[in-house]
Image: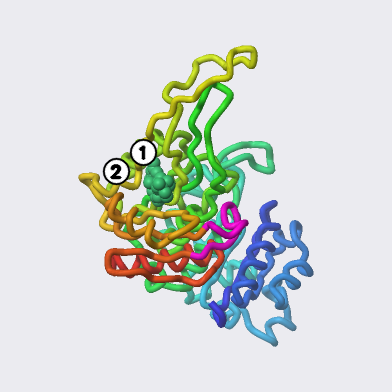
Amino acid sequence: MSGKRILLIVGGGIAAYKALELARLLRKADVAVRPILTRAGAEFVTPLSLAALCEDKVHGELFSLTDEAEMGHIELSRSADLVVVAPATADLMAKAANGLADDLASTTLLATDKPVLMAPAMNVRMWGHAATRRNLATLQADGVTIVGPDEGPMACGEYGPGRLAEPAAIFQAIMAALAGPAGRPLAGRRALVTAGPTVEPLDPVRVLTNRSSGRQGYAIAEALAALGCEVTLVSGPTALPAPAGVVRVDVETAREMLAACQAALPADVAVCVAAVADWRPEAAGAAKARKADAAPVLKLVENPDILATLSRAQARPKLVVGFAAETHDVEAHAQAKLARKGCDWIVANDVSAPGVMGGETNTVAIVGRGGIERWERASKTDVARRLAARIAEALA
Ligand code: CTP
């Protein structure tokens, strides 16, 4: 994204502080950010913070002689590849929808010939008001991309939709907008991703589970979504937030995971990353087992194999990908697993080195029927991005 330019309009709302984090993410990705801070916005964040994070001068006044001499507002409105409004207040949305131009931000929005992305943030009742609904519909019809708002508790004490989308989600939407159609090769495709551990109850308070963090699966869901894919992430319990733009279905047991996967079909691709418990206790006790009782003997029964079931499903996704964490004979085991499970690729993962399970990096090989592709050690995010790109190629 190096060389791309954003004009970032920061409106007046309590969420304006999140625009600072957005600016930081954009600068980290080497995107140039030129900020406009509205008068109301300056009540919430200071021009100094915004200038420091954007590493550029903050523009604020329409009738500033100095600013107009340096760069007129018309030029400012066209000096970027994309205009981003975050937070987009009800007032800014209303002005933009109706073509009002009584300050620098609204004038710039009227004068620009560049695509516009807005991330609304306002009180839940303001968001639900008929006037805002009308303005939103007008803006969407005018081709403005809308990100969020999220639902949740609000600074004003109410609850509902109206919270600014998380900076990471706005950042992703900006990246997609800057990349254009070429950056969304999976648009119109559906993916199913399983992630995290499963949890099998022994009794109402005890469980059998494993150490999977869910990181690799979540990163894959996020990377697929970033390429425009509609993603359902079926996840066992993890400490991770749902990636932006991904529908997460929470499950605990392997049987729940299978049912959620089957409900998410049809899909173009399934990527099974979850560490599914191979066995579960034959019967989970209805009451808590007591220490005074004799030490229990666990009888385990086999869980359904989700990857194998999806590979042989009637509505089989065109591409089914499994993961295999192995400590030795990695590729031989992966090849055997490919045949046994009936999937198209196994992403074989060498976990013999300490710190890989639950860690940040992975060394993988893609084992398919046609051969093996060995990838060098990379962060789980990079492995995810590369795999998502390979999936896009395979589905093209
Ligand atoms: N998997 C699954 N359902 C299961 C077990 C595994 O969907 N009940 C999937 C995992 O998500 C992973 C792949 O199968 O994509 C391989 O998992 P692994 O545990 O390595 O396979 P197993 O068949 O359990 O083989 P092993 O004998 O090595 O344990």
Residue at horizontal 53 percent and vertical 37 percent from the top: 209
> Pointer 1: residues within 10 angstroms few (<14), some, or many (20+)?
many
Residue at horizontal 35 percent and vertical 37 percent from the top: 304
User: Any atom of ligand 1 within 8 Å of the CB at mark 1?
Assistant: yes
Q: Amino acid at mark 2?
A: Thr
Q: Quadrant of residue 370?
A: bottom left
Q: Is residue 355 magenta?
A: yes
Q: Which residues are magenta?
A: 351-363
- The front one of 2 and 256 is 256
Image location of residue 308, percent across then percent down: 30, 46
Q: With respect to residue 74, does 44 lie above or below? A: above
Residue at horizontal 43 percent and vertical 54 percent from the top: 324
Q: Which residue is mark 2?
A: 309
Q: With respect to residue 249, does 222 lie above or below? A: below
Image location of residue 143, percent across then percent down: 42, 65
The answer to whether the residue labelled 2 contacts the one labelled 1, judged by CB atoms less than 8 Å apart, is yes
